[in-house]
């Protein structure tokens, strides 16, 4: 699709059912899912199992003659003990990228909206036993706050894990940093405040999910869009934005950021592109009094 002068292409890495809905969004009541089953199923929720359906995907943007990737998925051949579903994943993602007309050497900019395993994986590939940048000519844009937060040298600054699952996530984040972040730092811009990519595209902070979580705003002519990263994991969070995913580092701030993003999207007619929605991957947001609704799904 085109948004003004910017072309947007979705390149899928993985799609399917990955966990019980109320594991991913713990505070969401069962009736929230059941009352919206007519449109959540089958793309976003399986009413028979209660499982949430989602996708891992990269948005390819062509803007002002450059190729820009927004988030790079899980990646192949990685130790991910914290997420068995994606441990040593093996997909033909690079072939799918090529089918979209993008070779690794064609990529000019890689945007990581935040440093989580399913947003940075294809930053690198393994060659001769060493992780190297997958896109040799690209500049990698990484939020400085996340790079500092997840740098193993700063692990002592983070809150102590309260559960075994949190400990596993902590250990997993060290693996992610080692294989997907450290190898690209020589080609990275660690931005803070905001970062303008070109006259159409600007990165802005959206903290809470992680300290450095960001959104990418697209403005071209009269058209608007926002690539929202992990501010949303399911459409139910549009209806009830107070409900966080289980992955949010600062739940209170994450909920406030989500509501602010949805309000701006509704007021400025920004098409919202979350990172993990399956099927129709972008939504138009409308206000319904103090609440939000989905006006339409992008074709």
Image: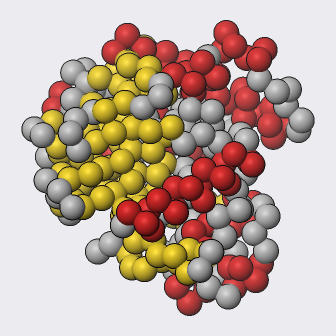
Q: Residue at x 47, y 25 (%)?
A: 192
Residue 85 image point, x, y percent: 60, 49
Placement of the N terminus among the 4 image quadrants: bottom left
The residue under the point 45% across, 45% down is: 215
Which residue is drawn at the image coordinates 69% and 13% (left, top)? Answer: 154
Question: Residue 248: which quarter of the image?
Answer: top right
Viewer-proximal residue among 81 and 46: 46
Quarter of the rendering occupied by the C terminus: bottom left
Relative to 169, is 64 on the left or the right? left
Q: Between 3 and 282, which is closer to the camera in this rendering?
A: 3
Residue located 42% across and 31% down the image: 194
Q: Horizontal placement of 148 versus 167: left or right?
A: left
Quarter holding residue 298:
bottom left
Q: Looking at this view, is 50 or 37 the one in front?
A: 37
Task: State the image coordinates of residue 92 (x, y, percent, origin top left).
Answer: 33, 46
Tell me residue 265's x, y (percent). Answer: 44, 62
């Amino acid at each position: 699709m085109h948004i003004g002068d910017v072309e947007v292409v979705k390149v899928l890495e993985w799609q399917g059912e990955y966990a019980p809905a109320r594991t991913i969004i713990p505070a969401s009541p069962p009736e929230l899912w059941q009352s919206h089953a007519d449109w959540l199923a089958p793309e976003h929720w399986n009413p028979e199992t209660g499982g949430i359906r989602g996708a891992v995907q990269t948005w390819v943007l062509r803007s002002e003659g450059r190729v820009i990737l927004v988030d790079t998925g899980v990646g192949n051949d990685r130790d991910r003990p914290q997420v068995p579903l994606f441990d040593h994943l093996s997909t033909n993602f690079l072939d799918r990228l090529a089918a979209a007309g993008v070779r690794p050497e064609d990529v000019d900019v890689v945007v990581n909206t935040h440093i989580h395993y399913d947003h940075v994986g294809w930053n690198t590939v393994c060659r001769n036993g060493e992780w190297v940048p997958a896109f040799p000519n690209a500049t990698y844009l990484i939020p400085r706050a996340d790079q500092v937060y997840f740098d193993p040298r700063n692990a002592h600054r983070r809150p102590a894990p309260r559960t075994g699952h949190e400990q596993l996530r902590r250990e997993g984040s060290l693996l992610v940093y080692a294989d997907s972040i450290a190898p690209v730092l020589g080609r990275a811009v660690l931005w803070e405040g905001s970062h303008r990519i070109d006259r159409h595209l600007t990165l802005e902070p959206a903290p809470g999910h992680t300290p450095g979580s960001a959104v990418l705003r697209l403005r071209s002519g009269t058209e608007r869009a926002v690539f929202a990263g992990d501010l949303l994991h399911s459409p139910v969070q549009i209806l009830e934005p107070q409900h966080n995913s289980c992955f949010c580092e600062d739940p209170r701030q994450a909920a406030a950021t989500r509501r602010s993003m949805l309000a701006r999207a509704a007021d400025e007619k920004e098409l919202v592109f979350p990172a993990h929605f399956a099927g129709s991957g972008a939504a138009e947001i409308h206000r319904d009094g103090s609440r939000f609704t989905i006006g339409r799904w992008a074709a």
